[in-house]
Amino acid sequence: MSRFTTLRTAALTFAGTTLLLLSNPVFAQETPQITPEQAQMLKELKKSFRQSMGRDPTADEQQRLLTAMGNAQIQLLGAMAGLKSAQFDRSPAGQPNPMPTPVSAPSPAAVPSTANTPSNGTLLALMRSTNADGSFAIFERKSDGFSINGQPFIDPDGKILDFGADAATGLVTYLVDDGAGAALVKLYNAKAKGQPVLAGRLRANGSRSTFEGVDGQTAGGETIVPMSRGLLVTRDESIVLVDWETGVSAKSLPEGFHAAAYQNGDVAGTRNILLERTRNPSPLGGYGSLKELFGKSDASDYAFYNLDTGNLVSLQFTRGKNEATFDTPAGRITRESIREEDGRPNYSHYYWSINWTNSKHGPLAVAIEKGLQDLNLIDLQTGTKHNVVHRGAGIQRFELVQLSDGDFEIRGGWSFKDHPIRASEVLAGEKIQ
């Protein structure tokens, strides 16, 4: 019997026993005194009852359960309640996959162990073990997942499809293709260097993606993007935030905007999400006008939205050619993609032109603006923009490289060369010459 089958059987047995005891009037006796530990177990039992019956147990039902089970039985059922890790199948087709994921041979020193199935308590313990000690973890995206401080991080359960990380806390949430049509959602603390914790699973049904956590919490929408502290679930005019510590919450978005499907930044650490303006595409291929193409317009299709304050920071960046063309058995097709058919980045996609991260200077963003002529560093707390470089011939690309001291390097790319400068230098008034 597989590990997930065993856990599912235990959970079903627990739920059935609880409901049977609560429905039997023979146990209606005087409520016994309970210890704080038993009170916690009762809380877990009430939660399971709510999930099964759709309501809270009455005071009489709680009394029957306590009288029937006693101290030892309550502790046993409470422990079983912590094993709610039933298998939630999910095809990862609805999840944006920013990088191709070829299989790489894992290094034994880099392979985390997930032999033990965690309870929600284990997930909370990992969240609360974060330490803002001033050090920063360096996460770098790789073709088979990511590296931490230069060391490859490879999960034994399958290929890592995507991840969201916060350099300041060391927390990273990542998605794993388990090879059986499911996507596992795991949390890891790069500073604690313990073991990753299973948070739940993803599944897709048509255009809808759904998350179901080990604690029974669920959320669904169009796309699901991993964040350092949880998941971002996007919808037409709203988002759902799944936080491993505080739970699930829904939030409406400013009128005229929706969440961008591709988030190339740290949403949880910076508390900022990238929004895309909801409007019909321009007849000029998305640029709107020649003014926009040559940086003579203030038009904007994208903005940063602060999840706590509601502040908007507009970007002078309009839609480019977000699509790429691919050969398929049915012929050549054009679809939105951050990569070209040969795997090279599709630099006309907004994903490569807008990035943001947590740093020792606070939440900062880097973006190409004004018709590709300006590369700017943006303070997401104040909205202040610091020009990194202005180039009339255009900026082809840039790369943001995290540094161990909490600073980061901006590498502007043009004329077949990289032109580096530190964020701290830009904040001090320097520019790339």
Image: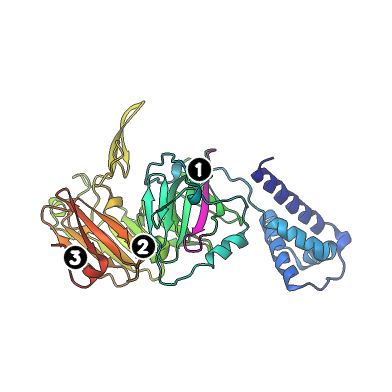
Which quarter of the rendering shows the C terminus? bottom left
Rounded to the nearest angstrom, the CA distance separating label 1 from label 3 is 42 Å
Q: Is residue 318 above or below residue 430?
A: above
Task: Quadrant for the N terminus, please.
Answer: top right
Compare marks 3 and 2 and give the one earlier in the sequence: 2
- Where disc 3 sits, the SS reads strand
Residue at left 52%, top 38%?
A: 179
Query: Which label lies toward us, 1 or 2?
Result: 1
Q: In the drawing, does residue 403 fall left or right of residue 161? A: left
Q: Residue drawn at (61%, 59%), measured in percent from left and top?
A: 120
Q: Position of residue 8 (x, y in %)?
A: 68, 47
Residue underneath mark 1: 158
Residue type at mark 2 is Pro
The x and y percentages for residue 164 are 42, 56
Which residue matches tag 3?
A: 387
Amino acid type of the residue that numbered disc 3 sits on in the rendered structure: Asn
- Rounded to the nearest whole Å, what is the CA distance between mark 1 and mark 2? 38 Å
- Per the rendered image, the range of residues in magenta is 180-193
Tell me residue 233's x, y (percent).
45, 54
Nearer the observer, 330 or 160: 160
